[in-house]
Image (tube, rainbow, N blue to C red):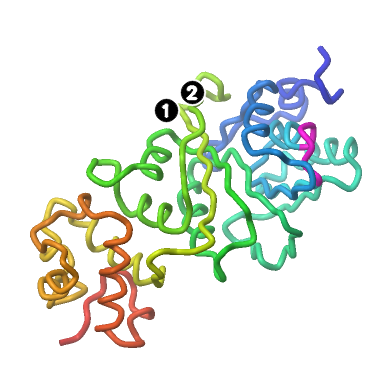
Amino acid sequence: MSTPDGLPPLREVIRELGLAARKRLGQNFLLDFNLTRRIARAAGPLEGVTVVEVGPGPGGLTRALLLEGAARVVAIEKDERCLPALAAIAALYPGRLDILSADAREVDYGALELPSPARIVANLPYNIATPLLIAWLKTDPWPPWFDRMVLMFQREVAERIAAPPGGKDYGRLAVLSQWRTSPHILFTIPGEAFTPRPKVDSALVELVPKNVLQPPCDIAALERVTAAAFGQRRKMLRAALRRIAPDSETVLEALGIDPKARAETLDVAQFCLIANALAAASGPDAKARPAGSARNP
């Protein structure tokens, strides 16, 4: 059977290399070339763009990105068993695929010295998807080195990223994501599209960085506030925030925020106002304290 790029079908590549997906690596392979090309097109246009791909596995999405016109793909893969499959793709596209054998959580992305525009496009391993997203959202300086992220998550995680205030899905991940980016779900993918089939469906999310952050806020302070507020989301804000700010009720009233409100009713801007107020009240050492730690009286 032929494929659009002339390489063997991915199922055949997996069989020849003995690439059984490993649960501990969060691996679920997408074998449908039409589907991976749809993902690549959703991340486009790709002409002139350098794409960072995390967890390419045997290269299904990698092949689609290159076929759809990506100028260069930097593929970061921890599983050494997949490297021969990626090397075969690199041979087909000379000078357009760089393979980095590494754990994506330990990569210094700034040191890659990627040209602009650069973009992150990935079918993320389920077990590291959220930590990776948070790390990218905390990129400093901001605006970041990427012009957008187009990422595959478990559907429930995708819904938490894009959730508006007021619902059960709205939480820390939504606040952090929506303060620094404009996220939206592009489309969902059923579990049966993956091998092995996961128990949940997935969704592709686009996150476009905001060039101007309103209101300005220190992300470490914002993390502390959202950790406290959503860590006890059934409590009123004045109680939930008391462990990081004993005078939380006074601070909230000064900001015009109801101390009896619950975390899920506040919008992103209100969380930023709280973070700024508590950081100012705490002094210059506020950033150094871990989330959830209380000030000394």
Compared with 37, 126 (above or below) is below
Q: CA distance from mark 1 to mark 2?
A: 6 Å
Q: Residue at x 13, y 77 (%)?
A: 246
| Location of the C terminus (image quadrant) | bottom left
Q: Residue at x 27, y 47 (%)?
A: 165
Rendered location of residue 224, percent (x, y)? 31, 68
User: What amino acid does circle 2 point to?
Assistant: Gly
Q: How many marks?
A: 2
**Mark 2 highlights which residue?**
191
Binning the other alpha carbons within 10 Å of mark 1 as few (below 14), some (14 to 19) or many (20 upward) gives few
Residue 110 — which label?
Answer: none
**Mark 1 highlights which residue?**
200
| Location of the N terminus (image quadrant) | top right
Q: Does the segment drawn in magenta span residue 190?
A: no
Q: Quadrant of residue 262?
A: bottom left
Rendered location of residue 131, percent (x, y)? 47, 54
Q: Quadrant of residue 97?
A: top right
Q: Quadrant of residue 35?
A: top right
Residue pushed farthest left? Answer: 260
Identify which residue, 8 or 173, lies in the foreground. 173
Q: Mark 1 and 2 residues: CB-CB less than 8 Å, in contact?
A: yes
Rendered location of residue 87, percent (x, y)? 83, 41
Secondary element type, mark 1? loop
Would you say 11 lies left or right of 244 here?
right
Q: Which residues are magenta?
A: 66-71
Q: Magenta part mainly helix, strand or loop?
A: loop
Would you say 250 lies left or right of 6 here?
left
Q: Residue at x 39, y 70 (%)?
A: 217
Would you say 267 lies left or right of 159 here?
left
Binning the other alpha carbons within 10 Å of mark 2 as few (below 14), some (14 to 19) or many (20 upward) gives some
